[in-house]
Amino acid sequence: MVHGRAYAELRYGRYPAKGRKIGNLGTALEIAMSMTEPRSLSAATPSTSLKVTLPLLQEKKRNRTPITALTAYDYAMARLVDEASIDLVLVGDSLGMVMLGYDSTLPVTMDEMVIFTRAVRRGVRRALLAADMPYASYHVDVAEGVRNALRFVQEAGAEAVKVEGGRNRAELVQRLTDAEIPVIGHLGLTPQSLHRMGGYRVQGKSVLAAEQLIEDALALEAAGAVLMVLEGVPREVAARITEELTIPTIGIGAGPECDGQILVLHDLLNLTFAPAAKFVRRYADAATLVRNAVGGYRRDVETRSFPGDAESYHLPAEARASLEHARPRQPRKA
Ligand code: KIV
């Protein structure tokens, strides 16, 4: 799709300054097409909100100020999330399900993750931007994991990466940390372990399982992890891990005692085509909003009430008059 400046250049050779006359076609204002406003350096983000850094998140834990986090996968949503002053934006591999329509996160590839992360990078200024290491990007060996994580930093501008798993990831976390890549751990219900878990089930429900989770969390912190996502664990276990770790915990289905909370943006907006999990709170019904908007557009096109005159471009009066008086074309010979 060509639009905005590219469209004007294509049609008129050169993109004119606003309001300038172009030949006898009227003013540039008249031909200006819808275009996403580029953000100026001072735009949108409140000047009071500092760029979020890892030390800032650490300070929030110390001060018991809750950390806010959400997923985002594209430029527009990332920009809205960032402008709402969310602290951490994660390009989760959940994009496989909510953006690409896969049944699980397992088919998501590095190349897909890099494309989405680059889009989100362009929308995020204030928040810390993290990218999810997808399944198979760190499961063969540590060196491959480091190479893939470096892609997120170099090609997509990520400021941290997230890996699923416990002490079995300690070496990887250490190597990534040595390579100056901040690592977010992810414990509990880890969707990449779907088959091993036998479904998306709450983890750490027995004393033994809870102790294992606590050990895993401590091992990842010792290896250098900077944050810890706790997903689908009893709130008592998450509270205990939050107490034991010096790094912040970010919960999803892990209760209110975590240092912060994260949700999948599409869950919060009702864009998942499925009943919400127990831990989700829906803040808007975007599905209904989109259905109504698209339905309204279809109706207006079908009844010819869109576009109206105000949504149409016009010839200047002089050109219109000469067109109206122009000799009608000869009918074509059969
Ligand atoms: O992939 C994802 O979106 C995640 C978050 C839910 C933590 O891992």
Image (spheres, grey):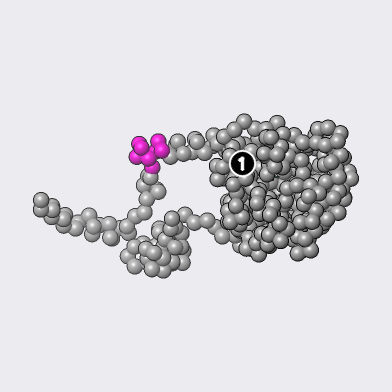
SS of the residue at dot 1? loop
- Is 12 situated above or below 129? below
Is residue 47 covered in magenta?
Answer: no
Q: Is residue 266 left or right of residue 182?
A: left
Which residue lies under the disc numbered 1? 104
The answer to whether residue 141 is seen in the rendering is: yes
Q: Which of 96 and 327 is in front in this view?
A: 96
At which x and y percent is residue 245? 87, 48
Q: Is mark 1 within 8 Å of ligand 1?
A: no
**Would residue 280 be found to the left or right of residue 29 on screen?**
right
For the residue carrying disc 1, how many other residues have a C-alpha within 10 Å: few (<14), some (14-19), or many (20+)?
some
Most extreme residue toward the front is 140
Q: Residue at x 86, y 36 (%)?
A: 208
Q: Please, what is the three-letter code of the amino acid marked with disc 1?
A: Ser
Residue at 45% over, 36% down: 295
Judged left or right of residue 49, residue 320 is left
Q: Which residue is the extreme one toward the right? A: 244
Is residue 114 or residue 65 the one in the foreground?
114
Task: Residue 4 in the image: state x and y as whole percent.
Answer: 46, 59
Residue drawn at the location 65% of the way across and 51% of the way down:
136
Image quadrant in which you'd find residue 285: top right
- Above or below 1: residue 195: above
Q: In which quarter of the image is the N terminus?
A: bottom left
Residue 268 is drawn in which quadrant? top right
The segment highlighted magenta reads 298-306
Above or below for 201 versus 334: above
From the viewer's side, name the closer residue of 200 and 11. 200
Q: Where is residue 322 in the image (x, y as percent from the top left)?
A: 23, 59
Residue 304 part of the magenta-drawn span? yes
Which residue does the image show at 63% across and 58% down from the upper left? Answer: 121
Q: Position of residue 38 (x, y in %)?
A: 56, 60
